[in-house]
Amino acid sequence: MTDGDARTLRAGRRTVRIQRPGKVLFPGRGGTAPYTKGDLADYHRSVAPYLLPHLRGRPLMLERYPDGLDGPRFMQKNTPEHYPDWIRRAEVAKEGGTVTHVVCDDTATLLYLADQACVTLHRWLSRTDRAAGPDHPDRLVFDLDPAEDDFR
């Protein structure tokens, strides 16, 4: 449903409002069409059954581009107070205090993060529900970034 400069999407028992769905996040280049915030929400909704098993129960660090990829970006660890109370949070110790991370357990949260222009969801390799805590990962990632885009 569209409401002026917003659109609402149903996700389970929740309705998530996407503000400014026509806002371009990924500019079109080389003959490709631009990709909007509404497109990102639709994409996240379509891949949620495949993506959520990899996110559930894991704290997230969010990479946000409020003005699209051509604008400034920032990394968000702490969950702002204005985020809906139905979004799960995980408080994690850090030097000198704690950080309260978002935990994405459902499609509604995924859609809300798309509305916040969260382009990259950096998930922890450990879970919040393990007795061993965040210092005991259950995943291992090999990140192969070639120098100068060359694997030689």
Image: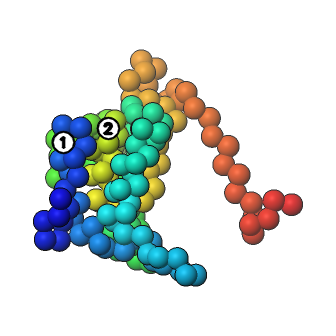
Q: Give the answer, above or below, for where 19 lies relative to 132.
A: below
Q: Residue at x 23, y 52 (%)?
A: 9
Q: Residue at the right extreme?
A: 152
Q: In which quarter of the image is residue 106?
A: top left
Quadrant of the rendered image containing residue 89: top left
Query: Which residue is outermost to the front?
Result: 1
Q: Nearer the viewer, residue 35 or 134?
A: 35
User: Around disc 2, counting alpha carbons within 10 Å, would you say few (fewer than 14), some (14 to 19), or many (20 or more)?
Assistant: some
Residue 37 image position (x, y, % from top left): 34, 65
- Residue at screen point 42% across, 38% down: 49
| Image location (x, y in percent) of residue 2 | 17, 64
Residue furthest toward the top? 131
Residue type, numbered disc 2:
Asp
Image label count = 2
Q: From this viewpoint, is residue 118 visible? A: no
Contact (Cβ within 8 Å) of mark 1 with mark 2 = yes
Q: Hey, which residue is sitting farthest bottom in the picture?
A: 30
Closer to the camera in the image, 98 or 59: 59
Q: In this view, does 150 lie above or below 106?
A: below
Q: Is residue 67 visible?
A: yes
Is residue 144 or residue 24 the one in the foreground?
24
The image position of residue 138, as x and y in percent, is 55, 27
Please tell me whether mark 2 sits on a helix, a strand or a loop.
Answer: loop
Circle 1 residue: 14
For the residue marked with disc 1, what is the amino acid?
Arg
Nearest to N terminus: mark 1 or mark 2 = 1
Q: Quadrant of the C terminus?
A: bottom right
**Residue at point 29%, 72% (across, down):** 22
Say which residue appears at 40% left-offset and 34% top-offset: 56
Q: Which mark is residue 106?
A: 2
67 versus 105 height, above or below: below
Report the side of 107 relative to 27 (left or right): left
